[in-house]
Structure formats: structure tokens, C-alpha cells
Image: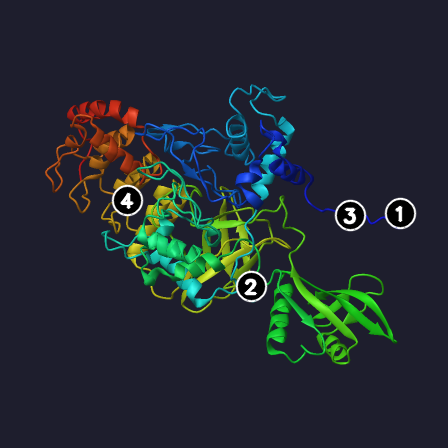
Amino acid sequence: MVRTIPLEDPTHREFKAGRIAFNSADFSSTKSFSCASCHPDGHSDQLLWVLKTPIVTGGTQIMPRSTMPVRGLRDTAPFHWDGIPGDPYGGINSASLDKSVKPNSELNDPLSAPRHLVDAGLASTMKLGGDDSLNDEGKPGLMTGGERDALSKFLLGVTYPPAQRRAYDNELSARAEEGFELFHILGDNDPSKRKPNVCGDCHRMPFLVSTNTPGSGMEAPTWRGAYDRFLILPQGRLNIIDFPFYRRVAEEGIPERAIWKFSWGGRSRFDPVWDMVLEGSTGFSGSLGRQVTLNSSTTEDPLSTDLLSALELSAAEGGVVLQAEGLLIEEGKGRAIILQYDSTAKGGSYVETTGQRKVFSRDDLFALANENRFVGTFTGRHGKNADYDNPQPGIWAQGPIEKQRGAQKFPVLSKQNKTMVVSGRHLKEGASVIVNGRKTQGSVKLGDNERVEIELASLPPEGMHFVQLQNRDGLFSNDFIFHVSDKKVDPQQLRGKIEVAIYTGNLSELKRLVESGADVNALSKDADLPLSSAAFHGRLEHVRFLLQKGAVATARNRDGGTPLHVAALMGRFEIAKLLLSEGAKAGVRNKKGESSIDTVSGEWSDGVAGFYRFLNGLTSNKVDLQEIRKARPRMHKLLKDRPKATRSR
């Protein structure tokens, strides 16, 4: 032995152990396959499998499912197409459309969701029939409890690669920005639908997923990494060679862009969404991994100098660590040299990382390169806080991260209001504010219940913009839309904010809006009163507050219905009693001629159950179908025997 070279692996110890478990075939009964067999490099084998999964509601056999990536699982629970494994929220899923199920994982323990997935996989997919092996915890399968915990940590820590086409200056292209707007706000003009199909209503920020899809109970899977997946939909139903449209694409090599265009019918207006997919942040600066070599032949090359300028700017902003490795000739002798860019050293210079820690300006290095005394490769590297313990931050429209709750409400800033309120997680004090790819002056205030206030020192021009947050030496959040407009906020916008406050159960926000002048009797764009919205979502304290502030219990929605119609239909007994005490009349009829009594008079049927499933997809406070079935006769009796009103309006 001539020399021993120590190998230092900075990887998180348990993450590394989990990676070994993920790639080991020792944990399958046959010792012939591992988790990585179907998820190579944390990705997907792009095959259909029939595994031991529950039968969907109304089905007679287990459905085949396409393999989903392991990448980016953190903050996207529950997992798989059917919304069953690792579910910390509960509610409906594909196997239980008629009745909400309880969570099978702990909401406050992120590891419990992948651990549930691991236990289920080891008890079924990885286990041969007849294999009765139990681990040290008494659970089916060959992996110990400690190994399962390590594997769960690994699953939470697998990230998506840096965005394929994000520019090295870290700014979104105009076409990608258009894609974000189409996906999250404007929607696809599908001629078969009455209104545009807004993908972002279900594939929501921050990570383009959501759960409890009305009508199917399934997950809305992520669009992240679509550029690496040619098998789409749960059963790959578009990837059938007998379809002429698919055969044409298959004969071209199955380019992913052509496949995903099927999902929007090939309508060219929606094509910029693909640029959103290619450029949207997965946590890394566009400068990460970019390299430029400086020598006597590149000092005058415009692309090389522009790239180096972009890398220096990103390093100055904390987006990357800019490091140069090369050879320096001094006094006729060459030596290896490692430099790091320091924006605070002499106005921006390169400092040796070892030895004498000499300082070189950019001009110094260019002069040395022109004299053939220096050659070096400059690389944008990520900071030290980009491991398992420092996951990608996420920011999204205020409210629960997992729910499908209609259109996303993006903030509108103005000269009078430079602060946006969003929801966010994995953020630390002192996080930087990034606007349109560039660090900007601003502050981040972290509150309770994932509330985040972002205040900008100055505003960009009027229009649509993108904000990201970045922890020090860490990862970037997703790109989040906001608007700047100095137009006076109209009452409808305030009404929209009231709707969000009611939906999310944010009573303090509702009070703030009302105190600032919001009309408690204004109709929403969907033609509902605030009282009706509160009744629909079962917000008793919101109803009580609105009544105190002058909301009219007998007022009408545009369809002629009253808040009592809504409370009765949804089985909100305490709200119905309160409205009756405030003068609401059970006999008042809407434009269809229906009274609130009529809303609960019909016999229970599959059609009625289906209607409630549809309503559950719209409310943040879902009703249990078995309970509402029992409640309807009791509500009917309450309305028929209604107490005398204490006052009228």
C-alpha cells in the first residue's frame, strides 16, 4: 500500500442507510428484486402493475396502476394514485367514495406517511405468497424496524433533479411565465366543457398535487418531472398502440412533450405549460451545476463572460457557491488552486480556500489566463443546507396544502399594500425573498399554522410576477404567482377574500376584512351570500359573527335560496337553529320553487348520494354520507316544527 485516501461522505447517516435498503434485493422473499427495481434512481419503470391494493368503489377487481416516481414525495401525502397509503388527512379515497375514512398516518409526524407505505409494500409487493416472515416489530416482511425507519427517511429525502431548462440567470422565460398563468389561472379552453379547465385547481401549488378528488377519491398526481414520464394516467389508457394518434407518437420515439399534449387535446394555446414544466423550480437555482472554463481562448468569448457574470451574481445573492478549480503558474511553477467567489471581498473577488488564501479579482484571473498562467473551471455549487434536514420550502395560496378548494387565490399588491400573506413550510427566520429570479429587498415573517407574510421593500411593475423564498445556503421554494396593480380593489375582490377566510375557517381574517369595510351581504362571483358560504362550510362562529355585523338571515342568493336552504341541505343543525332564531323562514322558496324543507324531503337514493359526493368536493368541512342520510329526516322535523322567530328583518 502506497497511500491511504480517506473518503468522506457528507450524506445524512440514516438517509444513506435508507438508500442501501432501497436498492437491496435482500428484503424481497425471492432475493431477486428491490424497491429500486420499479423505481430506478427514485424514478419510475413506466410499467403497469396489479398489486395487492384495495378494489375501487363500484369495482369488482384490483385495478392496474402505473408506477409513480419516488422523487419529491415530501409534502405530497397520501401516496399512489388511489390516495390510500400514507394518508395523514383522511376523507374519501378511491376505495371509499361514500364514507370518509380515518387517517392512517400522523399529521404531525412526516415520517409516519412513508413508513405506512413501506410497511404495506413489505407485507405485499415484496413478500411471496406463503412467506410468513415477521420482523422485530412483529410486522410482515423481512426488514427490521430500524431499516424501515431509515428507508422512510430516504423516501422523504429523494428530490427531483434541477429543472431541465431553467436559465443560468435563474429567471423564467416569458413562455414559461405564460405557461404558469395558463395552468393556474386562465385554464385550457376545452370545447367539451362549459368553462376553461384550470389544471391548477387540482394540481395545486406548491408541488402540483392534491387529494380527495371528488367523484373518484384519487390523488391528483404531480406534473413535476413530466419531462421524464411517457406513461400517463393511472392505467396508461392513452399509451395504447392500437390508437392511431399514439402509434404516430410511438414511432417518433415517444417524446414526452407529445404524450403530455394529449392531456390538453393538442390545443396549441396551452403549449407553454410544457415550458412551465421544464423551468419550474425544484429547489435549485438555475445557476446550479453551470460551468465555464477560463483560459486564453475564452476570455473574449461573449457566452463565457456572460455565464460567468450570471454565476457571480447568483453567488452574491446566495443562490450558489461559485468555486473555481484549476492550475496557476507562479515563478515558472504550476500548482493546483481552488478559489471561491466572495462578493464582499474587495467588491467581489476570488479567494483561495486553503494555504495563503490569496485574493484575485476577476480582472486578475483574466489577465493571468491571457498570459497562459491560469486555467480554471468555475462551477455553481449548492450551499451546505441542501440535505435531508433542509427540504425544499413550499409556498402556496393561504389554506390547507392538500385540499382541492377551487381556484387558487394569488395575492395582489399595490403601492398601498406591499405585503402578501401565503401559507408555507420548511422556512427559517431570515429567509431571502426572490422576485422574478433575483434576490430583492424584503422581509419574511413566520406565523402560526403555516402563515407566512412576505413584505417587499419595492414593487416590480404592474402585472404578473413570481416570488420564491430561500433559506440561507439552502434550497429555493417553488415559483409562486403574485400580481401588482394600483387599480382600486373592487368590492368583488374583498368578497373573494371573505370566501377564502370562510373556506379556511380563518375567523380572525374574516373579522379583519369586515372591519376594513367588506360588505357582509355582498354576493360572491358564484352568487352566494357570505352567510350561505359559512353555512355551506359549517362555520358556526363565522355565521354568528356575520349576523352580529349586520348580515341578513332572510337575504337571498341569486338563485332565490336563503342561507337556511344551504344549512338544511348540508345538515348544519346549529347553524339552522341560529338562522331560524334570527328570522329565517323555512317556507321561503327559491326560483325553482323549493323551500328549505324541500331540500331534505326526498328519499335517499344513489343520485342523492352522488350529489353529496359532489358537494363534498367543494367544501372544506365534508359531510359523512351515512350521517347525512340519517340527519335529513331530523332536519326535516326541525324545519317543520321550527321555533318562532325572535326577530325578523
Which residue in the structure is indicated by mark 3?
7
Q: Alpha-carbon distance for marks 1 and 3?
A: 16 Å
Residue drawn at the location 20% of the way across and 26% of the way down: 604
Nearer to us of marks 2 and 3 is: 3
Q: Alpha-carbon distance for marks 2 and 4?
A: 37 Å
Q: Earlier in the sequence, mark 1 or mark 4?
A: 1
Residue drawn at the location 79% of the way across and 66% of the way down: 337
Q: Amino acid at mark 2?
A: Gln
Q: Amino acid at mark 1?
A: Met
Which residue in the structure is indicated by mark 2?
441
CB under 8 Å between discs 1 and 3 = no
Query: How many neighbours does mark 2 have within 10 angstroms: few (below 14), some (14-19), or many (20 or more)?
Result: some
Q: Alpha-carbon distance for marks 2 and 1?
A: 56 Å
Which residue in the structure is indicated by mark 1?
1
Q: Earlier in the sequence, mark 2 or mark 1?
A: 1
Nearer to us of marks 1 and 3 is: 1
198 versus 314 height, above or below: above
Which residue in the structure is indicated by mark 4?
530
572 versus 177 height, above or below: above
Dividing the picture into quarters, in which one does residue 52 lie?
A: top left
